[in-house]
Image: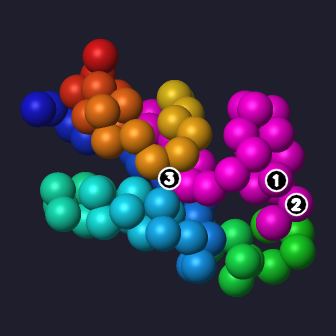
Amino acid sequence: MGTTPPVTVYSLTTCGWSRKAKDYFRQRGIEAFVIEYDTAGPALQQKMSAEMRKEGADGFPFVRIGGRVVKGYDPAAYDRLLRGA
């Protein structure tokens, strides 16, 4: 695998699926930029919500790998995007 694309995870601290997504990247040594929605300030929450709505997401985790979005915990999709497929 070449260069890993940038990974951003929008998460909730209380969400089990968000925990699984963060663990997925951590276990593979992939540095993900994680933003916890419930501990972010109001301005950042508003920005996150707008981005999620634009992408049709209504829950967490919300994962961006490179320029592509994965809604929810989906390891197969993460693998595919990390491989550049």
26 relative to 73, above or below: below
Q: Which residue is mark 1?
A: 49
Residue 35 in the image: state x and y as whole percent. 59, 68
Tell which residue pokes out farthest to the top in this image: 85
> Dot 2: within a 10 Å radius of its alpha carbon, few (fewer than 14), some, or many (20 or more) residues?
few
37 relative to 25, above or below: below
Q: Secondary structure at mark 1?
A: helix
Residue 7 in the image: state x and y as whole percent. 42, 48
Image mark for residue 8:
3
Tell which residue pokes out farthest to the front in this image: 16
Residue at (18%, 63%) from the top-left corner?
27
Q: What residue type is disc 2 on?
A: Gln
Q: Of label 2 and label 3, which has the lower sequence position?
A: 3
- The Cα atoms of the two marked residues, 2 and 1, are separated by 5 Å
> Dot 3: within a 10 Å radius of its alpha carbon, few (fewer than 14), some, or many (20 or more) residues?
some
- The Cα atoms of the two marked residues, 3 and 1, are separated by 14 Å
Q: Nearer the viewer, mark 3 or mark 1?
A: 1
Magenta span: 45-66
Q: What residue type is disc 1 on?
A: Ser
Q: Quadrant of the N terminus?
A: top left
Q: What residue type is disc 3 on?
A: Thr
Q: Secondary structure at mark 3?
A: strand
